Image (tube, helix red, strand yellow):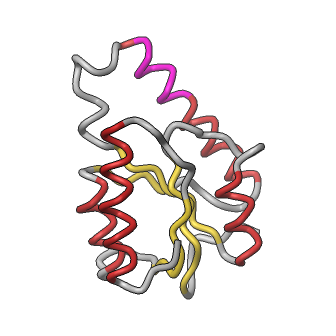
Amino acid sequence: IFSGSGGTMAAVWFRRGVRLHDNPALCRACELGNVIPVFILDPHFVEPHRIGVNQFSFFRQALVDLDEQLRVLGSRLVVLRGEPEKVWQDVFQGKCSFKVSTLLFEKDTSPYSMQRDEKVTALAGKHGVKG
């Protein structure tokens, strides 16, 4: 089901919901074929005034656990760093080792997330990437 190489694929952008079970975006991506799981370490969320040491440690462990679950399935979690709009632009422009034909993610209702998602969705559309 999961693949990290060859051809174009559906990217699942993990954000808050870093789990395999009960993940609608992941289920939809699996229906489409090859899946590349992606997490972007967004500098907005790792600023010290936004996240405490314990919370960051807990979330880091959740990412490690997710990667371990993906390895069992023959995949890996791709972790990229930077502002999501810039990171996805690089991906869409072919500056990464994988190509994406579809980008899927769970809805997030915080004001920052809604603005970010709107920008990324528009950028994806501009590059012919489906959502």
Characterize the magenta stretch by its predominant secondary structure. Answer: helix
Q: What is the tally of numbered marks visible in this picture?
A: 0
Question: Would you identify the image quadrant in which residue 47 lies?
Answer: top left
In percent of width and height, residue 57 lies at 45, 20
Q: Is 92 situated left or right of 21 in this image? A: left
Q: Is 28 situated left or right of 102 in this image? A: right
Q: Residue at x 54, y 27 (%)?
A: 61
In percent of width and height, residue 33 lies at 71, 78
Please provide the residue range marked out in magenta: 54-61
Examine the structure image and report whether residue 23 is included in the region drawn in magenta.
no
Q: Is 13 situated left or right of 33 in this image? A: left
Q: Quadrant of the N terminus?
A: bottom right
Q: Residue at x 33, y 66 (%)?
A: 88
Q: Nearer the viewer, residue 107 or 64?
A: 107
In percent of width and height, residue 109 lies at 46, 39
Q: Nearer the viewer, residue 109 or 58?
A: 109
Relative to 37, residue 92 above or below: below
Q: Nearer the viewer, residue 71 or 9?
A: 9
Q: Residue at x 49, y 56 (%)?
A: 38
Q: Residue at x 77, y 43 (%)?
A: 21
Relative to 44, residue 76 above or below: below
Question: Would you identify the image quadrant in which residue 36 lies?
Answer: bottom right
In percent of width and height, residue 110 lies at 40, 35
Q: Is 83 situated left or right of 9 in this image? A: left
